[in-house]
Image (tube, helix red, strand yellow):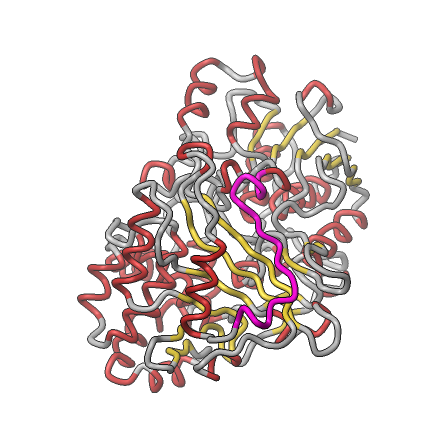
Amino acid sequence: MKQASVIGSGPNGLAAAIVLAQAGLKVDVFEAEEQAGGGARTLPLTLPGFMHDFGSAVHPMAVASPFFGRLPLAEHGLSWIHGDAPLAHPLDDGTAVMLERDLGDAERAFGEDGKAWRRVVEAPVTRWPAFASEVLGPVLHLPRRPFMMARFGMNAVLSAHVFCRRQFNSDRTRAIFAGLAAHSFLSLDQPFTAAIGLVFAVTAHAVGWPIPRGGAQAITDALGGCLNELGGSIYLGRRISSLDEVPQGLVLCDVSPRQLLAAAGERLSRPYRRTLERFRPGPGAFKIDYALSEPIPWKAKDCLRAITVHVGGTFEEIAESEKAMAAGHPPKRPFVLLAQPSLFDPTRAPEDKHTAWAYCHVPNATIYGRGIDMTDRIERQIERYAPGFRDCVLARCVSTPLDLEARDANLIGGDISGGAMSVRQMIFRPSLRQYATSSRDIYICSSSTPPGGGVHGMCGFYAARVALRRWGGKSESPRRVISRGDS
């Protein structure tokens, strides 16, 4: 059997390993940490009995993933839990703007902007499988649905600021869209920030924003189970400093460009090494995990209907927060992304207790230094909409950007998105070669390749297909890379 090695056991690394194993290769996965998963791990970060997602917590892209959808993940214990609504966005008047999953309910909830909301999301929602295959594919490709993507692209190229001014009349609708667009880690006056907001809006209606029962680790464990059935192996606690340490053969690296440079060394050409050296990390994250004595006491009780809550106020306030971050300044009133999974998944905490997960965007620690402790600023924002929140805190685990990098070497300076989301780095990610390198037997399959960050495995899927084609193996199409029992 031909030998393949995968460096890193995040969702992309495991996806790549599965594709290679399905093609008949002997696959070994090497993971530096003692627990597989990378950003998709669940850890006891606070008190006994409280389980917290180290990285991602809410997973619309995992449910949306064309590749994950073709794997028997449910047979390996993965099940999904939805909140009553995908998203809540509290405001200072004591109410919350709710993003309802049903498009008709959302149209009614958005009032005067309801028809505009439906108009911009309805086509991708109703044609979701086709849309998903386009947005979760390589950036450089000929679209199979050019008219649908052209209509989407007319809004997608805009900044969130321009898009909201053109489409919505209500400050409430603009506020909730600002939170969606802020997932881009970009200032909201930048081009393409509307695209990120629209994709997240579409997923809310098309597939929802669910959590895996038991935590993100359930995704990793299910992928690992699929790989194990195919004969693949995962070796934990095996930090690979040089690619010379792995068996000779095909190598796929679920690592950052910086790590690939260090591990591959002279096996890469000098021009390609220079390209990787120019790849810039994105902003960082400052994250806090909470053990709580009770649910968060939101003034707007509707917030208890959603697993995800965007805490940031108006469009203008969120835009100010993200603009400061983009300029290298920790925001004074940060936009906070918060998840409260134990409201719907009791496995996360002891009986009658709860967990919460919150983070804000900050400048990258490798570029701007360690920065400041954002704990008080984050908690003041939460208290603004949930007075008494601090009284519910039994314990907290504070993770600075450098703490995140220490637990996962891919998160350079706290960058959880796989690199800066500039136009150049969205198109050439991390280079014009994308998954391929200058060496025929070395490939990169991390979130620094298309389609970028998120738990969907598509970076690994596409990287493995490219590797198999170039290396002389068999490359399967997305429809054929499915489960056992496929004929």
Observer-nearest residue: 465 or 83? 83
Give the quarter of the image for residue 475. top right
Residue 455: image location, x then y, percent = 56, 53
Image vertical order of residue 32 relative to residue 138, above or below: above
Determine if the magenta segment contains residue 392. yes
Image vertical order of residue 427 relative to residue 177, above or below: above
Give the quarter of the image for residue 275. top left
Residue 3: image location, x then y, percent = 75, 29
Residue pictured at 40% horizontal, 75% vertical? 90
- Judge left or right: residue 208 versus residue 349: left
- Judge left or right: residue 209 versus residue 30: left
Would residue 140 be seen by someone viewing this image from the given angle? no
Observer-nearest residue: 137 or 177? 177
Q: Quadrant of the N terminus?
A: top right
**What residue span does the magenta drawing correspond to?**
389-405
Determine if the magenta segment contains residue 366. no
Observer-nearest residue: 329 or 153? 329
Q: Quadrant of the C terminus?
A: bottom right
Image vertical order of residue 370 relative to residue 391, above or below: above
Residue pictured at 29% horizontal, 50% vertical? 323
- Judge left or right: residue 169 versus residue 200: left
Residue pictured at 43% horizontal, 67% vertical? 310
Would residue 124 be seen by someone viewing this image from the given angle? yes
Residue 263: image location, x then y, percent = 61, 22
